[in-house]
């Protein structure tokens, strides 16, 4: 934990406010309205929400339901009970949550302890503890629970209580429209009458050394002296400041500070001397203006339960913010504090904060790059050139007409000058009679230079706004460039060009290409790697500005972070890292900057404002511990999950060897904290777990003993806390010792059985071998006889096939001969009819043809003979396929005889294509599949 010097905060008139972080219902996934906040001893925050009890450990939100899913109106954590209890009040319901052995909250209702009380719209609005008694307060009654005796007693005062307050060791009550009373152990004794309270009611109590402050809802703050019972106005100025506000809640944050929550204007924080420390409302960071509950956690942070959402405020944060709400000032480029006045140069102009208000300075309504004071003169560089700021007026420097980017007071060639970079030339200012005046432009060089540095050798290093930088040397009169060298890269091995930046650290020029740091070796006269920085700050080469806080302390402005380093005993050490993500409206990428005032205070430049950094005074936070929020095991086959105890060694069935570990480390500071874990016996090294869930899963773990080790570390790898958790995955039953012994006995029995069976088989085998040999001899004789018969049959079949082919050849020749004669006869008859030949000649030719034609049907004769040889092939084929034509049957016969297509074409006087067409038609009629062979079909057809 750390504390800040409140005197420093109060001394500044600029209304800086602490950082605030907001959580809406879409973040915590519950009702929008929140009523009360408390904290457990493990640091977890509990919030009474309209949907139930919320818990938040800095990473994970959880909603814990109450009976009938009713909302919670109040919460109180009793950290001093034997077992921590989270008391919760609801509508006609109250009780407490306790953690079970698995660290999961379980609810226990106390309502059943009331024997003779009838609830009538009782909502529990506050819960307090006094001694061993817990007080639950509603608007009509209050209930006292004795933790030791476990008794619950109901009280019905008239009028009913509005609020109960705990101050010091006393309990107070404000009763509706009536007195302010103190509990005396038996009941509430009136302390102040209503007319003593300006006919108002008390909304809060803060103890003081002499008594207490009483906060009226509408009519100010009273100081009560407990010794004299005297009431006085505490601070009229504060009363006047709060005159339009309705006080609803009050929080005593420290012994000297308190926070007021209002119904319409957010939060006010005051010191006990009456000074306003900060005021937060919706316009400058609060999520909602209606404050329903306030709580101060162990780190001095404020939790505000709001009518819509939750806000978390860090009064002890090292950085506070000032963002004007009355005017939009844009991105801050530079700032200056002079004689109690704040000047801001932004991308929209120059602004001055003075006398509790900020306003633009006329004439500067342009992009302004810098505002610097040299001696008694204030210079402003902007788009139009450079101006002097005198008496809140813009006095342009007429000679400087090109945009002013940077200006440095340097000593060059034995002269003190102001060297300025612009959109084009470099310009020199001389000091005449105590005033800086424009002198001249340096000739021989012009470019868009946004910053300049000069080393002890007199080299001017000029950084281009976008691409590379220059090394320049001037003549003795600083009027002409006599030497010029341009750098676009620092490492020739890099494939892609990166931005190059020029800085100065402890008087030495530093370059960065976002991969490494470099410096200028004036002996070798070349740029070389800056080995010390690359070793000490190896991951910070994205630095583009270095700002000195002191001789040994420096800010590095990086792409997404402000980093504070110290130079100690010859080494650069990182002291603080401030990521842009935790800043309100961080600067644009590459546009961050830091201003250090004469007191050593640092200011960050933001989008729409500035942040102020106050160095921490660190104290060890011994209460913060890394804990297991829960360990669950699951059986993936049954899709079942259950939590197991976290404070003892667990013996887990092998069937549930999928484990999920959820950690908690109550870090609400927004500083980067990492949780790493290592499962001894499984992991090969430490691994960082997801910062968004703090959960790690291990699936299908083998049987064995394990120790989970986990640690919380900060960004500098300092260990903050650690834990270990032991467990065992049991060996599955089929791998247990007695099962293995059984396996061995079964194996022995099996081997004995196998051996005996083998011997019996060998004897049987020898007997069978003799029988088999005899059978084989007889079978061989039989086989030889069959082989002889088969050879004879094959010879006969071959002879038969030969004869069949001879028959087919002869038959086809005769058939073709007769078909030719018939065709010739028809042709002659046609010629006679047409008169092409004489009838007598045609008659003689026809008679000759008829003489050579036989009366027998040669095709019928062929079919008859073929059926005799081939077991009625034609008859069976025609019976099964009646659609076959004689041509199809003729082709079928030739295919059965295994004639080739070429042979068939010659025998049938067809072309090969005609044969293929005939075969295709035949396949279609036979309905053969594409993979069936037509010839094999015919040969095998029976």
Image (cartoon, grey):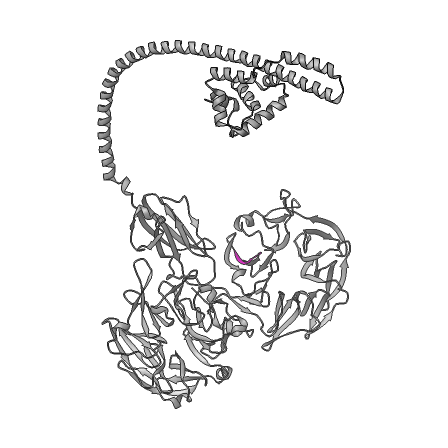
Between 636 and 803, the residue placed more toward the observer is 803
Residue 525 percent location from the top left of the image = 66, 46
Residue 889 percent location from the top left of the image = 54, 22
Can residue 258 be seen here? Answer: no
Q: Is residue 49 left or right of residue 279?
A: left
Q: Quadrant of residue 608?
A: bottom right
Can residue 474 be seen here? Answer: yes
Quadrant of the drawing holding the N terminus = bottom left
Residue 635 lies within the magenta run? no
Above-or-below relation of 496 to 131: above
Between 379 and 81, the residue placed more toward the observer is 81
Above-or-below relation of 645 to 366: above
Between 478 and 564, the residue placed more toward the observer is 564
Residue 562 lies within the magenta run? yes
Highlighted range, magenta: 559-566
Q: Residue at x 36, y 9 (%)?
A: 785
Q: Quadrant of residue 68?
A: bottom left
Q: Quadrant of residue 321?
A: bottom right
Q: Is residue 606 left or right of residue 674?
A: right
Between 418 and 107, the residue placed more toward the observer is 107
Identity of the residue furthest to the front in this view: 840
Above-or-below relation of 681 to 593: above
Quadrant of the drawing holding the C terminus = top left
Most frequent secondary structure within the magenta stretch: strand
Residue 282 percent location from the top left of the image = 52, 73
Q: Is residue 408 left or right of residue 580?
A: right
């Amino acid at each position: 934990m750390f504390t800040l010097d409140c005197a420093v905060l109060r001394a500044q008139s600029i209304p800086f406010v602490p950082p605030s972080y907001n959580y809406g219902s879409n973040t915590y996934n519950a009702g929008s309205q929140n009523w009360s906040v408390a904290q457990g001893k493990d640091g977890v925050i509990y919030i009474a929400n309209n949907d139930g009890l919320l818990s938040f450990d800095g990473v994970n939100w959880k909603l814990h339901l109450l009976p009938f899913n009713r909302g919670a109106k109040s919460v109180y954590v009793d950290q001093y009970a034997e077992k921590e209890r989270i008391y919760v009040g609801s509508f006609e319901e109250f009780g407490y949550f306790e953690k079970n052995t698995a660290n999961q909250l379980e609810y226990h209702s106390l309502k059943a302890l009331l024997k003779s009380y009838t609830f009538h719209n009782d909502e529990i609005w506050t819960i307090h503890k006094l001694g061993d008694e817990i007080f639950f307060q509603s608007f009509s009654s209050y209930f006292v629970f004795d933790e030791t005796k476990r008794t619950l007693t109901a009280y019905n005062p008239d009028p009913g209580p509005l609020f109960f307050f705990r101050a010091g060791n006393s309990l107070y009550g404000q009763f509706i429209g009536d007195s302010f009373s103190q509990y005396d152990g038996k009941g509430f004794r009136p302390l102040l009458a209503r007319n003593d309270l300006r006919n108002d009611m008390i909304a809060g109590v803060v103890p003081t050394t002499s008594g207490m402050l009483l906060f009226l809802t509408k009519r100010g703050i009273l100081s009560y002296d407990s010794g004299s019972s005297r009431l006085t106005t505490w601070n009229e100025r504060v009363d006047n400041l709060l005159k339009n506000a309705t006080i609803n809640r009050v929080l005593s944050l420290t012994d000297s500070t308190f926070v007021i929550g209002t119904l319409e204007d957010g939060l006010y924080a005051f010191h006990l001397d009456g000074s306003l420390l900060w005021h937060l409302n919706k316009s400058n960071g609060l999520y909602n203006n209606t404050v329903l509950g306030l709580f101060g956690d162990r780190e001095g942070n404020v939790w505000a339960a709001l009518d819509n959402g939750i806000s978390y405020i860090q009064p002890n944060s090292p950085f506070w913010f000032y963002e004007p709400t009355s005017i939009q000032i844009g991105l801050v480029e530079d700032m200056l504090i002079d004689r109690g006045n704040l000047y801001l140069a932004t991308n929209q102009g120059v602004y001055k904060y003075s006398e509790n208000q900020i306003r633009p300075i006329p004439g500067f309504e342009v992009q302004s790059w810098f505002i610097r004071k040299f001696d008694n003169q204030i210079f402003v560089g902007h788009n139009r050139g450079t101006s002097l700021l005198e008496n809140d007026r813009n006095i342009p420097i007429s000679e400087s007409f090109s945009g002013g980017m940077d200006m440095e007071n340097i000593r060059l060639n034995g002269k003190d000058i102001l060297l300025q970079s612009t959109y084009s030339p470099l310009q020199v200012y001389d000091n005449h009679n105590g005033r800086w005046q424009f002198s001249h432009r340096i000739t021989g060089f012009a470019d868009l230079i946004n910053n300049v540095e000069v080393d002890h050798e007199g080299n001017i290093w000029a950084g281009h706004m976008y691409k590379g930088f220059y090394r320049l040397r001037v003549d003795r009169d600083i009027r002409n460039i006599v030497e010029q060298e341009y750098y676009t890269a620092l490492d020739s091995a890099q494939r892609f060009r990166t931005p190059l930046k020029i800085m100065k650290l402890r008087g030495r020029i530093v370059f960065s290409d976002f991969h490494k740091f470099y410096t200028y070796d004036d002996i070798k006269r070349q740029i070389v790697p800056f080995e010390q920085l690359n070793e000490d700050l190896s991951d910070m080469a994205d630095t583009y500005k270095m700002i000195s806080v002191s001789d040994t302390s420096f800010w590095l402005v990086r792409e997404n972070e402000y980093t504070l380093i110290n130079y100690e005993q010859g080494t650069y050490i990182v002291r603080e890292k401030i990521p842009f993500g935790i800043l309100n409206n961080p600067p644009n990428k590459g546009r961050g900057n830091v201003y250090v005032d004469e007191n050593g205070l640092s200011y960050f430049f933001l989008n729409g404002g500035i942040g102020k950094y106050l160095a921490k005074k660190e104290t060890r936070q011994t209460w913060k511990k890394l804990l297991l929020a829960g360990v669950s095991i699951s059986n993936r086959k049954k899709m079942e999950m259950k939590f197991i105890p976290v404070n003892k060694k667990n013996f887990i069935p092998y069937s549930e060897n999928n484990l999920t570990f959820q950690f908690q480390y109550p870090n609400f500071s927004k500083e980067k904290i990492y949780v790493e874990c290592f499962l001894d016996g499984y992991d090969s090294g430490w691994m960082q777990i997801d910062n968004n869930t703090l959960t790690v899963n291990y699936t299908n773990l083998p049987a064995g003993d394990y120790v989970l080790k986990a640690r919380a570390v900060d960004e500098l790898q300092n260990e903050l806390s650690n834990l270990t958790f032991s467990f065992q995955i049991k060996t599955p039953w089929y791998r247990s010792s007695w099962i293995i012994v059984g396996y061995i006995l079964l194996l022995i029995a099996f081997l004995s059985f196998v051996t005996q069976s083998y011997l019996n088989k060998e004897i049987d085998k020898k007997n069978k071998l003799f029988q088999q040999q005899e059978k084989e001899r007889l079978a061989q004789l039989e086989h030889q006889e069959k082989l002889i018969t088969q050879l004879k049959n094959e010879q006969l079949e071959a002879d038969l096939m030969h004869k069949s082919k001879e028959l087919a050849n002869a038959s086809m020749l005769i058939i073709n001969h007769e078909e030719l004669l018939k065709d010739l006869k028809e042709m002659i008859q046609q010629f006679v009819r047409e008169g092409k030949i004489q009838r007598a000649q045609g008659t003689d030719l026809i008679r000759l043809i008829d003489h050579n034609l036989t009366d027998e049907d040669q095709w019928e004769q062929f079919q008859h003979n073929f059926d005799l040889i081939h077991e009625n092939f034609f008859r069976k084929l025609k019976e099964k396929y009646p659609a076959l034509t004689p041509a199809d049957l003729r082709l079928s016969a030739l295919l059965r005889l295994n004639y080739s297509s070429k042979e068939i074409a010659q025998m049938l006087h067809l072309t090969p294509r005609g044969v293929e067409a005939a075969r295709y038609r035949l396949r279609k009629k036979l309905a053969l599949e594409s993979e069936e062979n037509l010839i094999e079909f015919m040969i095998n057809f029976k």
